[in-house]
Image (cartoon, rainbow, N blue to C red):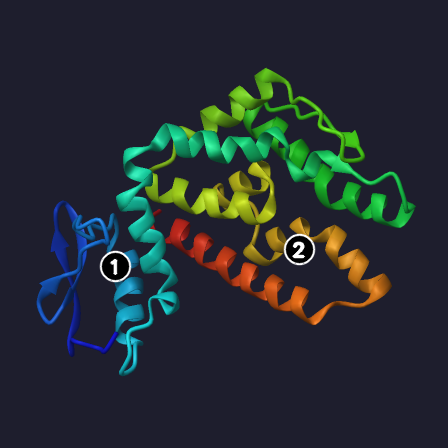
Amino acid sequence: MKRFYKDVSVAPVDGGFGVLLDGKPVKTPGRNPLALPTEKLANAIAAEWRGQGEEVIATSMPLLRLANTVIDGVANSRDAVIDAILRFGENDLLCYRAHQPPELAARQRAGWDPWLDWAQQRFGAQMTVAQGLTHVDQPAEALASLRGALETFDAFTLGGLHVIASITGSTVLALAVAEGEISTAQTFALSRIDEAYQAEKWGEDAQAAKRAAALAQELDKAVELIGSVR
């Protein structure tokens, strides 16, 4: 749609911070106030609005889209979102290892074992590792520990965690991000050990590289969202 505003500002609203376009507060698609928990996040979203040209392109405002999702959805369905994040823990990427070739198996061990050890030490979640793709049930105690960790987070952090777990296939990596233990780049690289190995051996498909770049950018914005509400 055509740009319909000139001035973008940030102001206190509904116990948080809102973005104003020509003095009028922005609302979510669900017609809820865009009430953001920190001024940092409000300023970041205001920058997205300021960065629009003659046309307003929603896809070029990822933080706004994430915030809308949280306010219209996550905030009213915390338990369902936690369940969704935990489902990635039930089939956590870090727990499924290659039989062959030895080089790939070694990369997986070197990259993933430290984070499973971290999850055990930090949350008491001792995950079961299996070879191959056959499903293995994770211990109920481990999943309960991961759930307990997720339940401590606010709605905005949960929204970011859901995106991170969806991209990486790992609740453990998502929690490591939320705890500030791992960088965005390292998180993405660890989630793509298999793909990186295959690309080295057989070459990288252009379309696959494009999809990977888009996922990396989406992951980066989810991490930014989490960082901006701390």
Residue nearest the viewer, comparing 198 with 205: 205
> Helix, strand, or loop for circle 2?
helix
Task: Specify whether 221 is left or right of 71.
Answer: right
Residue corresponding to mark 1: 42
Task: Specify whether 193 is left or right of 210.
Answer: right
Q: Residue furthest bottom?
A: 54
Residue drawn where x is 38% and y is 28% of the image: 79
Tell me the kind of residue under disc 2. Answer: Ala
Disc ID at residue 116:
none
Q: Residues within 10 Å of mark 1 (few under 14, many from 20)?
A: many
Residue drawn where x is 77% and y is 44% of the image: 108
Residue nearest the viewer, comparing 230 with 60: 60
Residue drawn where x is 17% and y is 50% of the image: 31
Task: Specify whether 87 is left or right of 195.
Answer: left
Identify whether 230 is placed above or below 118.
Answer: below
Q: Residue furthest left?
A: 23
Residue drawn where x is 78% and y is 63% of the image: 199
Tell me the kind of residue under disc 1. Answer: Ala
Q: Residues within 10 Å of mark 2 (few under 14, many from 20)?
A: some
Location of residue 80 in the rendering, given as x and y in whole percent from the top left corner: 40, 30
Residue corresponding to mark 2: 189
Badge count: 2
Identify whether 91 is placed above or below 18.
Answer: above
Location of residue 130 in the rendering, given as x and y in whole percent from the top left corner: 77, 29
Q: Quadrant of residue 45?
A: bottom left
> Helix, strand, or loop for circle 1?
helix
